[in-house]
Image: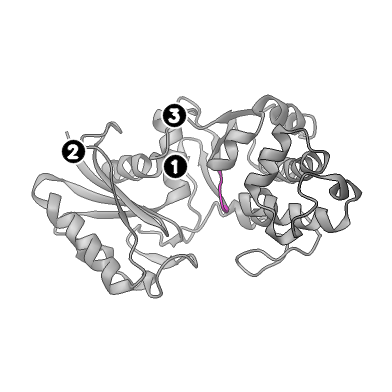
Amino acid sequence: MKKILAIDVGGTKLVHALINEQGDFLTTPEKVLTPKNIEELKKTFENIINKYENDIDLTAFATAGAINITNTKVESSTPNMPDGYNSIDFAKLSKKPVYVENDANAAAWAEYKVGAAKGEDNTITVTLGTGVGGGFIVNGKLLRGKSGRGGEVGSMKTATRGRICTCRRKDCWESYASGSGLKFTAEETAINCETFKSSIYKDKRPKDITTYDIINGIKMNDEYSLKVFNIWKNDLIKGLINITNIFDPESIIISGGMGEFIDTEEIEKAVNSETVVAPVKIKLAKAGNYSGMIGAALLAAEKY
């Protein structure tokens, strides 16, 4: 049975572990801080790989950013990664095969193979965190597009309110349906909403209101917080309706930190009331916090 060294690359930390071709962990995941310098980052990768090189069959990376069609290189990276990240030749980091996949795609594959979408050949995983990521399984295959950049669901246009996204374009779904989007909605609503004047946060500057403030306000039945969350929820639903109508999936799996705050039954009912295709199931992810590592390992095992 193959042993895969799986490495999940985040802007804050790197997590690595050995995983077999069935998606089972063979070692306990270990975490290290992500270096802010590109040379230090490459050295960290090399050190991790050298530690296991004699015992593994291949290495699999799950990382943010656009990955080339051959799964060997990050073609464009996210702002939280060191400058020059897209210059790394991952194949040269090891004597064994190296596989690189976008973390949202990898998470989608994990949900399809061992998680909430197991047995469903048409499924979408939407990751709701600081940003919005997406991975699409169509007829049992990962949708990657002609260049490997397919599935960038967070860049879909779903509103016309002029909000600037982290990609510096306007009105991307990510800028509304992410955790950051909830914060932006809180700020905009505070400026224009009468209920803010009687809110538990009325003494805060609108730009200082956080996502966690809104979640806490909901628990305290704060009218302003409830209004903000309902706006955010409707922005989320709009995007889910769009991808459901386009792809006609059996399920949409919600992963990421914001997923714990939504009622999937409520979202499912709202989405299905507006779509023109067969009803879709909305479910929370089951593959866990290490779904990117699992998915990348499983994809790598299939390729090699």
Rendered image: mark on residue 56: none
> Which numbered disc, 2 or 3, marks the residue closer to the eye?
3
Residue 72 x/y as whole percent: 32, 61
The tag earlier along the polypeptide, 1 or 3, is 1
Instruction: Give me the C-alpha separation between circle 1 and circle 2.
Output: 20 Å
The tag earlier along the polypeptide, 1 or 2, is 2
The residue at which mark 3 appears reads as 115
Please say if 33 is above or below 58: below
Number of on-image labels: 3
The residue at which mark 1 appears reads as 107
The residue at which mark 2 appears reads as 2
Mark 1 and mark 2 in contact? Answer it, CB < 8 Å: no
Q: Which residues are magenta?
A: 126-131
Disc 2 residue type?
A: Lys
Please say if 270 is above or below 135: above
Instruction: Give me the C-alpha separation between circle 2 and circle 3.
Output: 21 Å
Q: Secondary structure at mark 3?
A: loop
Residue drawn at x 62%, y 49% is 179
Q: Secondary structure at mark 2?
A: loop
Disc 1 residue type?
A: Ala
Whether residue 7 appears in this view of the structure is no
Q: Is residue 238 magenta?
A: no
Disc 3 residue type?
A: Gly
Instruction: Give me the C-alpha separation between circle 1 and circle 3.
Output: 9 Å
